[in-house]
Image (spheres, rainbow, N blue to C red):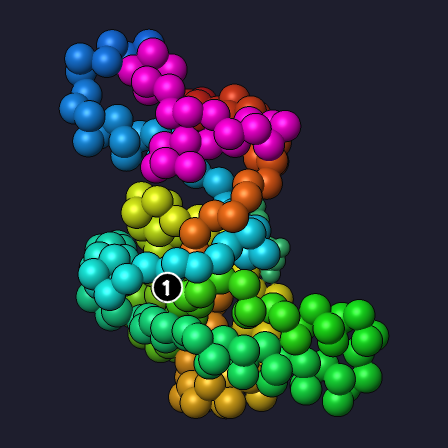
Amino acid sequence: MKVGDYTDAKGSAQANAPLGDLYGLGAGRYTRRMNTLLDLLTRRQSTPSKLLSEPGPDPAQLDALLRMAMRVPDHGNMTPFRILGIRGDHRLRLSARLAEVSAARGDDPAKVEKDRNRFNHAPLILAVIAHVTPGHKVPEQEQLLSAGLVAYNLLLGAESLGFGAQWLTGWSAYDRGIAEWLRLAAHERVVAWVHIGTRSGSAPDRPRPEPSSKYSEWQST
Ligand SMILES: Cc1cc2nc3c(=O)[nH]c(=O)nc-3n(C[C@H](O)[C@H](O)[C@H](O)COP(=O)(O)O)c2cc1C
């Protein structure tokens, strides 16, 4: 699939349609570059991590992704985030660690097996780490949101480079033992495992809310 292509509700690949028509904006009003961005935002959809395979981003593409991630809004320039890249055998070791932890706590064997493969599909996992400063004049919510936006920019960036991506968390993102095993500091937490790779298939899109059900005009009384 190319950038801008998408899958319809039945999972069939659809070619990129001109966005000017979609919005009735008149194609001439937007440059091709703008249309690409609008297409991306209008049709963004995750690719399940199981459908992500080699090749992953090359060093130049990874650099581009990281630059995009640094463009997030950030109240007070606190940069309350960092990114850990996890690749190759290190992904497999992380999966194995998850399986060890879930087996040790007596999880269902099927769940342990799922954990054993959790990071084995996408060639690149970008762990977005937030470090929120409590009591700062910038509210904690805003710091955490900036870190979340890093994950979202990575999703958009990956798609813009032609890759598929999925933002996952699961129990491992909230587990202090896993955080320590990753050598995170006490005030750091994982807000996203962003799985990135080449799409080996596509999942059907999920139903999206009708915008009008989520929008209303406020008027003073
Ligand atoms: C903070 C956050 C955590 C998520 N964690 C998971 C997860 O652990 N497992 C999962 O299946 N989806 C998770 N998702 C949802 C997927 O990222 C994705 O949105 C979902 O597969 C639907 O696809 P879409 O992005 O095309 O709507 C999470 C999303 C967010 C924003």
x and y percent of residue 203 in the render?
59, 40
Whether residue 87 sits left or right of residue 33 in the image: it is right
Using a 10 Å C-alpha cutoff, classify the residue at mark 1 as few (fewer than 14 neighbours), some (14 to 19) or many (20 or more).
many
| Quadrant into which the N terminus falls | top left
x and y percent of residue 91 in the render?
49, 76
Q: Is residue 156 visible?
A: no
Q: Is residue 108 above or below residue 62?
A: below
Whether residue 158 sits left or right of residue 116 in the image: it is left
Predominant SS of the magenta segment: loop
Whether residue 48 sits left or right of residue 88 in the image: it is right
Mark 1, residue position: 147
- Give the magenta part as a residue range: 1-22
7 in the magenta segment: yes
Which element is circle 1 on?
helix
Q: Is residue 80 above or below residue 49?
A: below
| Residue sitting at x 73%, y 73% | 113
| Residue sitting at x 68%, y 86% | 100
The amino acid beneath tag 1 is Ala
| Residue sitting at x 60%, y 85% | 97
Q: Is residue 169 above or below residue 18?
A: below
* Residue placed most toward the observer, 92 or 39: 92
* Residue placed most toward the observer, 128 or 12: 12
Tell me where residue 187 sits by quadrant.
Answer: bottom left
* Residue placed most toward the observer, 8 or 145: 8
143 in the magenta segment: no
Tell me where residue 196 sits by quadrant.
Answer: bottom left
x and y percent of residue 165 in the render?
45, 52
Tell me where residue 114 sits by quadrant.
Answer: bottom right
| Residue sitting at x 60%, y 68% | 118
x and y percent of residue 121 in the render?
54, 63
Q: Is residue 65 visible?
A: yes
| Quadrant into which the C terminus falls | top left
